Amino acid sequence: MIFHVFFLFSLCSSDYGILRVASLGINYGQVGSNLPPPDKVLELLNSLKITKAKIYDTNPQILTTFANSDVELIATVENQMLSVVMDPQQALQWVSTHVQPYFPATKITEISVGNEVFTDVDKSLVGYLVPAMVSIHDALVQLGLDKYIRVSTPNSLSILQESFPPSAGCFKSEVSGIMSEYLQFLASTGSPFWINAYPYFAYKGAPDNVNLDYVLFNKNPGMVDPYTKLHYDNMLYAQVDAVVYAMSRLGYGGIEVRVAETGWPSKGDRDEFGATPMNAAAYNRNLVRRQMRNEGTPLRTNTRLEVYLFALFNEDMKPGPTSERNYGLFEPDGTIAYNVGLSALSTTSSTSTSTSSSSSSSSFFLTSSSDNKSVVHHTAYTIGPSSGAQNPIEIVAPLLLHHRHSLATVGEVQPPHALSLRMGIVFQPGEWTEPNQAEPSSLAAWVQNRPVIPYGPKATIGWAPRSNWPSGKTLWNLRHSLREGTTVMCFWVRLYGPEGTPLRWAPTFRLGLKGLKQ
């Protein structure tokens, strides 16, 4: 199997790597039918310089393969085992079988006792949680491993009754009793409170009311907590601080909070607004940049926030909506699931290979064929402004809509560049008039009145100010009003000067359009 390994987290023209980010890890799930073997996964992690990973079991093949590597592992007691390991003898047997034989060759640093137990559909599990954690910890003490391996459990953000503003954070009354016991255990053992935090869920639930830039870590006005006067420029940090305030209300404000899972899906069902490759790339890219700065939250500015990205691979056997199977940064064969707009590496290199010359190339993925499969994989693209400016250009939000098919996106690029795509254009320079999204006939008429240039040699593509960009609902509705075989490309661009300083909105761009061979 050939792995096309991309160095996702090296900024353009930078040699920074994950090795320098002690606070970043990744979730290595295994609910897939075609995932690579552990040795290939280890190669991938090493290439990415990721030195922390969490698994959802104690797979002996993984624990054996990761021996004598630089990767620290969090192993998991699965939910169905909680009632068993709450018994001290069973807990000792579990640790003796699943942990002790592999340690210290395999760097197991923590045991996760269950996952999201407080909010599991099986309400009986929560009663087993703290006794199971105590028994596992006591087993570690008995075996002399407690100084090296901590015990905790990840929690869903839905354990909170209130999370906005952050200072109003409090736990739901139905969990507060056992939560106090859990927090007492964490405080006595020096273990962290793990939270699974997904700003995506907030955006999906109210796309017209939640600022997308705020949840994606993009530049935005942010919000100020009216009680603490702390300023938040992203939702993840606000969610983490809400947990801190909730713990403080129970008398345990000194416990460290870490993010066990966070991520963004690159694909979703029709009602899963925002599940696109572009948003997934933006969320992960911007979060990694924060991690490279070892940032803390506004409430705990001097404590770096430890974060585990979700997830390493797309997992095709996960139940639920389409998004659940599309959180991975990588496909099972090692190709990236979407373009994060950052430098690419081969499996034998750990330095950036991107350039800004006209011969440079990058990769992105489009879905536009009649069978809904990717027809564009590795496409060299170049874009140059008509003004001839030499500053970096960020394609902030390009969107490709195809009749009855998925949204597709392009990531961040550097000039001068040219674009090769197989598509038709129904957008003119400087033009955007919001059609009436409540009336399908209006949408259809709007589309019918737009010129189509399929496979044309050249086309002038217009732009629209961000304030006048179509809403998410309009884009989704518009997609289903397109004529058969028609694709729409809409985007805005912005020029950036030295050190990323925004200069101005760029007007018209000339794009070369070519048919691609499948």
Image (spheres, helix red, strand yellow):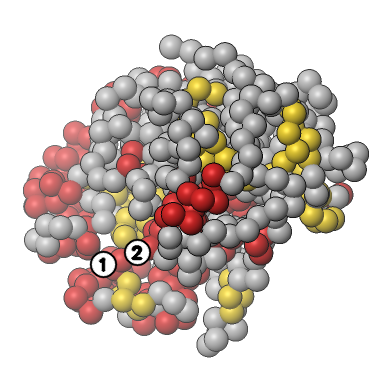
Contact flag, marks 2 and 1 (Cβ < 8 Å) = no
Q: Position of residue 203 (x, y in %)?
A: 45, 61
* Relative to 187, residue 497 above or below: above
Residue 163 lies in quadrant: bottom left
| Secondary structure type for disc 1 | helix
Question: How far is the residue under mark 2 from the one under mark 1?
Answer: 16 Å
Q: Which residue is mark 2?
A: 157
Inspect this view and state whether residue 3 appears.
yes
Q: Position of residue 73 (x, y in %)?
A: 39, 38
Q: Which residue is mark 1?
A: 182
Q: Residue at x 57, y 40 (%)?
A: 488
* Relative to 288, residue 195 above or below: below
Q: Amino acid at mark 2?
A: Leu
Between residue 479 and residue 382, name the one nearer to us: 479
Q: Position of residue 164 (x, y in %)?
A: 44, 77
* Relative to 470, residue 1 above or below: above
Residue 302 lies in quadrant: bottom right
Inspect this view and state whether residue 309 appears.
no
| Secondary structure type for disc 2 | helix
